Amino acid sequence: MGPRIALIGCILESNAFAPPSVEDDFRRLCYVEGEAIPTLARQDPSPLPAEISAFVDRMDRNGAWQPVPILIAAAEPGGPIDQALLERFEAEITERLSQEGDVDAVYFCAHGGMTATGEDDPDGRLWAAVRRQVGPDVPMAATVDLHANISDRMVGSVDVLISYLTNPHVDQKERAEEAADHLLALLNGEKAEAAFIRLPLTPPSVTLLTAEGPYADLIDYGQSRQTPEIMNVSVVGGFAFSDTAKNGIAVIVTARGAVEPAQALAADIAQRAWDMRERFNRPLMSMKDATDRAVTGDALPAIYSDAGDNPGGGGRGNTSVFLKALLDADVQDTLYGVFIDPELAAQATKLGPGAEFEARFNRHHLADDRFAPPVSCPAEVRAVHDGNLVGSPGLWEGRQLALGPTVALDLGGVIAVVATERKQCADPAFFTMLGLDLRAARTVVVKSRGHFRAGFAPFFPSERTFEVDTPGLTSPVLSRFDFKNMPRPSFPLDKDAVWEPPEWARAYLASRD
């Protein structure tokens, strides 16, 4: 019947400055238990995380096996997971594993950047709990986002830790397939040994693109050093906004059989990362310059990232400062999305296409939310949609998405897309499903940090793509945040930060010099 492989997933990227993530946040996106997991994983399109579907598909194609489905829970990036919910997830996972009896291997799909209201390493906690339950000899592989924050406990709990290689993230399928292949090799007797280094280097996410730049160079170098001795090379950029003791670029190299090749390569990559640390700075365009460029129309069409309010990093999707600046400047031929305002979306949906009314963004403004003041302006409902779609090429290609009731509001020169469910605007379909023509726009503004690049590249080349210095919970200007737990000094926040390699790495670095 083939090996019995447990399928587990708990996916959350935590922003310490956002409201806590609770059970409803997972229920709204993905909360699937037991036998429904392989059924949904084999559905096309699937509502499950891309890694789960890809892992199941790879195992199906590799031969006979038995899925042991446990729990797949995922929420949009938000605040730390509620501690009681984390503890319940742990209890449910270990109880289901106990009920299933012996398993031959475990695949754990995670983001790796989760924190909890009572601790900063819930990923490590869950992985360690699984390890205790299945025992020390059962092969276990985990996949993580390259914005994960890696702990010793995470590395020590699994046989192989596999990070994405792309940002925007378009290789989830390949990384899950890699996990399946490694598990089969481990089941056939292969042994894995890992080396792990974390640096006092916590760059903003806008510097962690993999098409070009310092992070791209590190990823490419690590992959170029793959040899038959090396099982996996993961250079994990981290997520500064988690504000944890495990913040910092991490290098995890897994070797076959002996740890020495892993240690040598990990030390080499870490030193290279530290030597290029000055490159992890990226200038942003000011809102004034972005608005002026949108007004003058003396250049080719461009796309702008409302980088300070990225729902894909815990932003609430409702900051209104940039929108108001565009309206006040009377810009024309501009598309803006996606603004998250369930009440406004519901009102416009009820009014229907062609209706004219006074649109009130953030009508129930919270006094302590300085980033989302109310904005009112005349509007016409251009189009309405139920928000259900399948992702186009890019971050969510082929995956089921649900934005809830979504509308296009004509505010004069700006057409704003307003949705119900919080999700970053990384897919052109968020506009085109409403009949909006991206090629006819002079200016497009998206609430996304960088993942929009994959989907919008056919419309806007990199030289006409700009990150704008906007306020919000995901501002790339890290000095604006009151970090309490991040190890300090840490570059680039602290220019005088110093890295001391672990003792085992010094001999390798000395021999390299």
Image (cartoon, grey):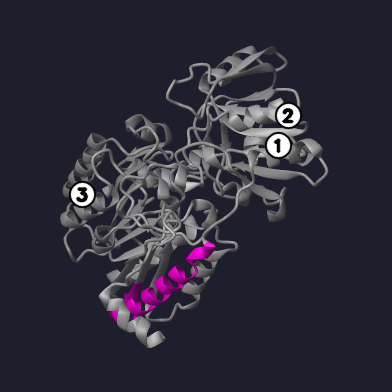
Residue at image location 46% in from the left, 42% down from the top: 480
Q: In the image shown, does 29 or 124 lie closer to the viewer?
A: 124
Q: Which residues are magenta?
A: 254-279
Dot 2 and dot 1 residues touching (CB under 8 Å): yes
Q: Secondary structure at mark 3?
A: helix
**Residue under label 3:** 97
At which x and y percent is residue 410? 71, 23
Under mark 1, the amino acid is Thr
Q: Which picture quadrant has residue 416? A: top right
Question: Is the C-beta separation of discs 3 and 2 under 8 Å?
Answer: no
Q: Closer to the camera, 52 or 281?
A: 281
Magenta stretch: residue 36 in it? no
Q: Mark number for residue 291?
A: 1
Quadrant of the rendered structure where residue 83 is? top left
How much space separates mark 2 and mark 1, taking CA atoms? Answer: 7 Å
Residue 261 highlighted magenta (yes or no): yes
Residue 447 in sight here: yes
Residue 170 drawn above or below residue 481:
below
Mark 3 or mark 1, which is nearer the start of the sequence? 3
Q: CA distance from mark 1 to mark 3?
A: 55 Å
Q: Position of residue 331 (x, y in %)?
A: 75, 31
Q: Marks 1 and 3: which is nearer the front?
A: 1
Q: Earlier in the sequence, mark 3 or mark 2?
A: 3
Q: Quadrant of the N terminus?
A: bottom left
Identify the residue position indicated by label 2 in the image.
329
Q: Quadrant of residue 153?
A: bottom left
Q: Do labels 1 and 3 touch, CB within 8 Å?
A: no
Disc 2 secondary structure class = loop
- Which x, y percent locates residue 362? 53, 21
Magenta highlight: main SS: helix
Q: Earlier in the sequence, mark 2 or mark 1?
A: 1
